[in-house]
Amino acid sequence: MREIPGRRRRIRSRHGDGTPESVDAALTFATRWQWPVVPGVGLDARQPDRCACPDPDCTVPGAHPLDPGLLAATTDARMVRWWWTSRPGAPIVLATGGKAPCAVSLPALPAARALRALDRVGMRLGPVVASPTRWAILVQPYSMEQLGELLYAKDFVPGSLRFHGEGGYLALPPSRTGAGPIRWERAPLPGSASPWVPGVEAVVDAVVDALTRTGVSAPEF
């Protein structure tokens, strides 16, 4: 997925040491886990439900990069600290693919049902990112060719599934976007190592199976 953004707004949430929560989180992603990140455009201060980018019909308000663009995503600590010290309210946007995780996302209600079904069959999942409308399951990096072959082999793939692969992006906690606050539905385990994530094949197979078993007709959001 690719989209477009713009302006800035500050948040007051801070740790006890005075460090903005967004700076701490962005530095963890970038330096400890080596996930390249870039600030999202954020929301319009005059209309908090609208994206600050120039597109009045933005489909992912606040949750995409604009200036700097996605290609500026980095793991450099100095750059990351400067970005979120200057714009502590900016969403944290992960550039998916490469050495960073990719993701499979679906609407929140069927996602919750799918996760419960996966838990029942013992499917191991890594971190799951949630907004009020959609949840995203982080997966190992995959190529478009790999994804294409996987989907081609399926008799049925819910149209509400979205894939965040190479050249895509995903807002990470603790961000606020037009969809609402971004949080961990399944938080990464504490520790210094980059979180474990499953392969995309296992997740797509399990999610499609879970949605079929539970009879969920997942609408597009």
Image (cartoon, rainbow, N blue to C red):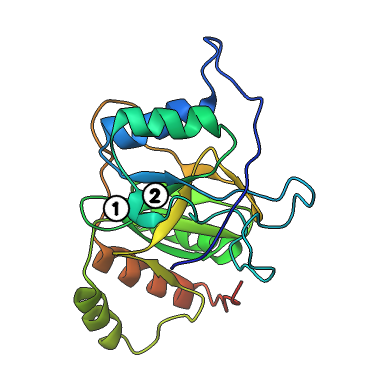
Residue 181 location in percent, x, y?
A: 62, 45
Residue hosting label 2: 94
Find the residue positioned furthest to the right: 46
Residue 114 location in percent, x, y?
A: 47, 63
Q: Relative to residue 164, is residue 149 depicted above or below?
A: below
Q: What is the C-alpha distance between the residues marked 2 and 1?
A: 9 Å
Q: Nearer the viewer, residue 78 or 191?
A: 78
- Label located before the other in sequence (2 or 1): 2
Q: Quadrant of the N terminus?
A: bottom left
Residue 121 visible somewhere in the drawing: yes
Q: Is residue 146 left or right of residue 211?
A: left
Q: Relative to residue 110, is residue 129 depicted above or below?
A: above
Q: For the residue marked with disc 1, what is the amino acid?
A: Pro
Q: For the residue marked with disc 2, what is the amino acid?
A: Leu
Residue 212 location in percent, x, y?
A: 46, 78
Which residue lies at the image location 22% right of the left edge and 56% below the top edge? 98
* Disc 2 element: strand
Q: Quadrant of the C terminus?
A: bottom right
* Cβ atoms at labels 2 and 1 below 8 Å apart: yes
Q: Callout 1: few (<14), some (14-19), or many (20+) C-alpha neighbours within 10 Å?
A: many
Q: Is residue 198 left or right of residue 133?
A: left
Residue 120 visible somewhere in the drawing: no
Which residue lies at the image location 56% right of the left edge and 75% below the top edge? 216
Indicate the quadrant where residue 154 lies: bottom left
Residue hosting label 1: 101
Q: Relative to residue 90, is residue 81 depicted above or below?
A: above
Q: Which mark is residue 159?
A: none
